[in-house]
Amino acid sequence: MGQIVASYDLMPENTDVDLGGVIEAVPSVIPNGVKVLESKIEPVAFGLKKVNVGFIIDDESDSIGEDLEKALASIPGIENVECISSTVY
């Protein structure tokens, strides 16, 4: 079993979404075998911001990446989830 370090962007539905609340919700929705490394709010454009979250993922199942994306997309106010980088750790 290996580990993967990955970074995900979570795009909100609109500028009214509480991004601090999104960051607080991440640890409660992620599947077993995934740990949060860091999270931050970054500007996108025209007042829109996104949440960027870094993870260490145990490569224990073939569907762990898909499970993580579904979990992140389930956070209220999140419209889109995108893996922007990943590498074997």
Image (tube, helix red, strand yellow):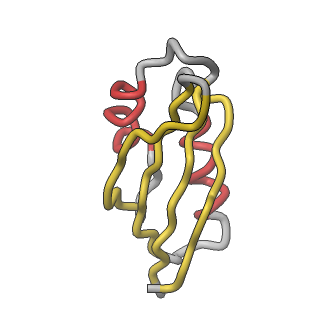
Q: Quadrant of residue 18?
A: top left
Task: Judge left or right: residue 56 versus residue 67.
Answer: left
Residue depicted at x 57% and y 37%: 44
Task: Judge left or right: residue 83 versus residue 7.
Answer: right
Task: Judge left or right: residue 80 versus residue 20.
Answer: right
Of 79 and 67, nearer the camera is 79
| Furthest residue in direction front, as rendered | 46
Q: Quadrant of residue 83?
A: bottom right
| Quarter that holds the C terminus | bottom left
Q: Is 44 drawn above or below residue 16 in the view shown?
A: below
Q: How many marks?
A: 0
Residue depicted at x 67% and y 37%: 80
Residue 4, given in percent of the width and then of the height, sits at 49, 77
Residue 9, given in percent of the width and then of the height, sits at 56, 48
| Furthest residue in direction top, as rendered | 16
Residue 32, given in percent of the width and then of the height, sits at 42, 58
Of 3 and 15, nearer the camera is 15
Residue depicted at x 60% and y 32%: 45
Q: Is 31 drawn above or below residue 15 in the view shown?
A: below
Q: Is 52 drawn above or below residue 84 in the view shown?
A: above
Residue depicted at x 36% and y 39%: 28
Of 29 and 88, nearer the camera is 88
Residue 16, given in percent of the width and then of the height, sits at 51, 12
Q: Is 14 drawn above or below residue 29 in the view shown?
A: above
